[in-house]
Amino acid sequence: MNLQLFFLDNLRINKLLTFNSKEKNKRRKFTQMSEINVTPFVDVMLVLLIVFMVTAPLLTVGIPVDLPKVKASALTDQKDPIEITVNIEGEIYIGESLVEVENLIPRINAITELNTDARIYIRGDRVVAYGRVMEIMSKINSAGYVKVALITQNIK
């Protein structure tokens, strides 16, 4: 008998067993919450938004070039152009890959699939010899590409 009373007391203390009807009613008042808490989701999305806003401009850096500063209007073109960069040492890059002068036109032909209407932008460092940039521009022009433009930086 003592053992049964001991277990009944423990069950009553731990509220696993109730004899009072008031305690049953208290237990029924508390129900499980059926709403989704979106606050953590919103917090995570805001953090991701900030991270992408900070990292997005860093993804388009390319080859570091000190562009000449001029007053000119910006070109607006819908298609992605081919960017050719001439750095301070006179090395030529298509996108971010180094190219020799003799391989420049075959690489452009392969990229454009012989589409001579493709837009080509040339970025040249401002201390590079004018002749080096013109040499590249003339090779591209003599290959039949007519939409060739020079990229500069606006004066602030």
Image: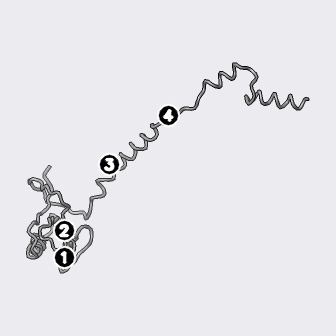
Question: Which residue is located at x 65 percent, y 22 percent?
Answer: 26
Q: Is residue 122 above or below residue 52?
A: below
Query: SS class of the residue under badge 3?
Result: helix
Residue under numbered circle 1: 104
Task: Verify CB contact (< 8 Å) between mark 3 and mark 1.
Answer: no
Earlier along the polypeptide chain: callout 4 or callout 2?
Answer: 4
Question: Which residue is located at x 10 percent, y 71 percent?
Answer: 145
Query: SS class of the residue under badge 1?
Result: helix
Earlier along the polypeptide chain: callout 1 or callout 2?
Answer: 2
| Mark 3 nearby-residue class (10 Å; few <14, some 14–19, many ≥20) | few
Quadrant of the image occupied by residue 18: top right
Residue flagged by tag 1: what amino acid is it?
Answer: Leu
| Residue 47 % position (x, y) | 40, 44
Most foreground residue, 89 or 117? 117
Earlier along the polypeptide chain: callout 2 or callout 3?
Answer: 3
Residue under numbered circle 4: 35
**Quadrant into which the N terminus falls:** top right
Task: Verify CB contact (< 8 Å) between mark 1 and mark 2.
Answer: yes
Earlier along the polypeptide chain: callout 4 or callout 1?
Answer: 4
Quadrant of the image occupied by residue 30: top right
Q: In the image, 10: left or right of 83?
A: right
Cα separation between marks 1 and 2: 9 Å
Cα separation between marks 2 and 3: 27 Å
Question: Which residue is located at x 48 percent, y 36 percent?
Answer: 37
Residue flagged by tag 3: what amino acid is it?
Answer: Met
Most foreground residue, 141 or 68? 141
| Residue 74 % position (x, y) | 12, 54
- Which label is found at residue 84? 2
Residue flagged by tag 4: what amino acid is it?
Answer: Glu
Residue under numbered circle 3: 53
